[in-house]
Amino acid sequence: MTKSIPVRKNDYIDVRFEDLTHDGAGVAKVVGFPIFVQEALPEESGKIKIIKTQKNYAIGKLVEITEKSPYRVEIPAGESHKYGGCQLEHMSYEGQLKYKENQVKQVLTRIGKLEDVVVHPVLGMEEPWHYRNKAQVPVGEKDGKLIAGFFKPRSHEIVDTNESLIQLPEVNEAINIVKDICSRLGIEAYNEQTHKGVLRHIMARYGKQTGELMVVLITRTLELPHKTKIIEEIIARLPMVKSIVHNVNSMRTNVIMGPQTTVVWGNEFVYDYIGDVKFAISAMSFYQVNPDQTKVLYEKALEYTGLTGGETVIDAYCGIGTISLFLAQKAGKVFGVEVVPQAIEDAKRNAELNGITNAEFEAGEAEVVIPKWYKEGNRADVLVVDPPRKGCDEALLQTIIDMKPTKVVYVSCNPGTLARDLRILEDGGYKTVEVQPVDMFPQTTHVEAIAKIILKEGN
């Protein structure tokens, strides 16, 4: 017998919220049937309107709050803040950290069946606003002027945004000034529907420790109209700029950057530091967007490795060498692997930049290269993984189990896949000792976590 849905579209009902989803929506239940409502918090009661029903859940809209959560705070005024990716800005920072700690605990228990693992309180920021060192915003037109900002959810309608509260002020300023310059010079915005126009995105990258700024203009066209004038005005109005880059993306695609990148003024790189390690960052480099918390994350990863100076470390998914070079300061030898060849070139350059000679890097898939190293006789005392959201490849996890490093440190940007992979390692002879969540993205639902894993005795 088919179970009936207890609510219908356009119903108005009174509910109590008991949880949050992974994307920050409040969860209420009617006779066990879940209803997801954006901007609602646990421990709140209110009236909602049902706007969509599915077989196993419904979507509601918050109409009125009759009992507020102790963690509810006033959100900043202005429509633009609703679309800046800040799913939890209506929740106090104390509440956000508790939510993220519970999220990690719940997935470790539910997915990983890991009930005895110590999960520490989340390491948060003293000032959880204005932390992002990079923005890449879509460009459109309205009333004859350029606009740039965020897309409304589930649409490609751009909301013009002069200040994002999670971007560094220098990044906000750069985006606004470049938008103004291009608008006054009559640069035409790219139109997705017609695949015509010129300017698709504006990107700004800022080295917080060095004060160096990079501006990237992404166009559909090979030519950047008024290029000389644009460069002159950017230099005049943004004195901290060290690099101006033109990227061409002529394809019909949602991918932001195209294959052709040209430095039109200044340097190819801007520089920044994580701790004492200096990094060269190009327009295409992957570099953590919250430098303050990246230092916290890497220091904890270094602590979990327990390096004393003689160990061999393998860093899977090493990117431009950020963790590898951090670890190389305490290790005997570090081997890094990354699938993106350009990132490996960046990693080698960053090692040279810092005079680090005990780190080697190879381009390729971690799940291919590390088993190859293993067959060649290269053994790791400590293995560090920092995979993408999909987690570690099964072949890599099996190689870890076969290689038997005494310690594994898992840096994760997705607690769900972390829990899944920890279960596989546990079944393969390892024990998860502790997990430290780190809040890299305040005001959002994302949480990173570091797991300390040791080989069980007798394995």
Image (cartoon, rainbow, N blue to C red):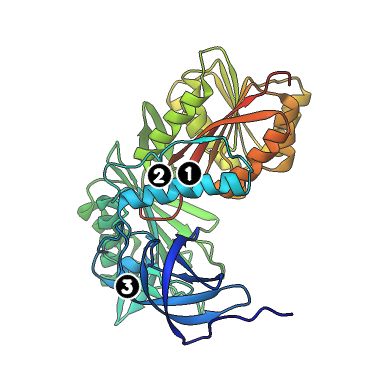
| Mark toward the start of the polypeptide (2 vs 1) | 2
Q: Residues within 10 Å of mark 2 (few under 14, many from 20)?
A: many
Q: CA distance from mark 3 to mark 2?
A: 28 Å
Question: Label 1's element?
Answer: strand
The quarter of the picture where the C terminus appears is top right
Q: Are marks 1 and 3 in contact (CB under 8 Å)?
A: no
Label 1 amino acid? Glu
Q: Is residue 238 above or below residue 181?
A: above
Which percent across, then down, holds residue 188? 37, 74
Q: Nearer the viewer, mark 1 or mark 3?
A: 3
Label 3 amino acid? Ile
Q: Nearer the viewer, residue 297 or 349?
A: 297
Q: Nearer the viewer, residue 360 or 190?
A: 360
Q: Are marks 2 and 1 in contact (CB under 8 Å)?
A: yes
Q: Residues within 10 Å of mark 1 (few under 14, many from 20)?
A: many
Residue carrying label 1: 448
Residue carrying label 3: 65
Q: Is residue 288 above or below residue 64?
A: above
Q: Nearer the viewer, residue 3 or 132?
A: 3
Residue projecting furthest to the front: 31
- Work out whether residue 215 can be spotted: no
Left or right: where 391 falls relative to 440? right
Residue projecting furthest to the right: 375
Q: Are marks 3 and 2 in contact (CB under 8 Å)?
A: no
Left or right: where 267 falls relative to 389? left
- The residue under the point 61% across, 39% down is 114
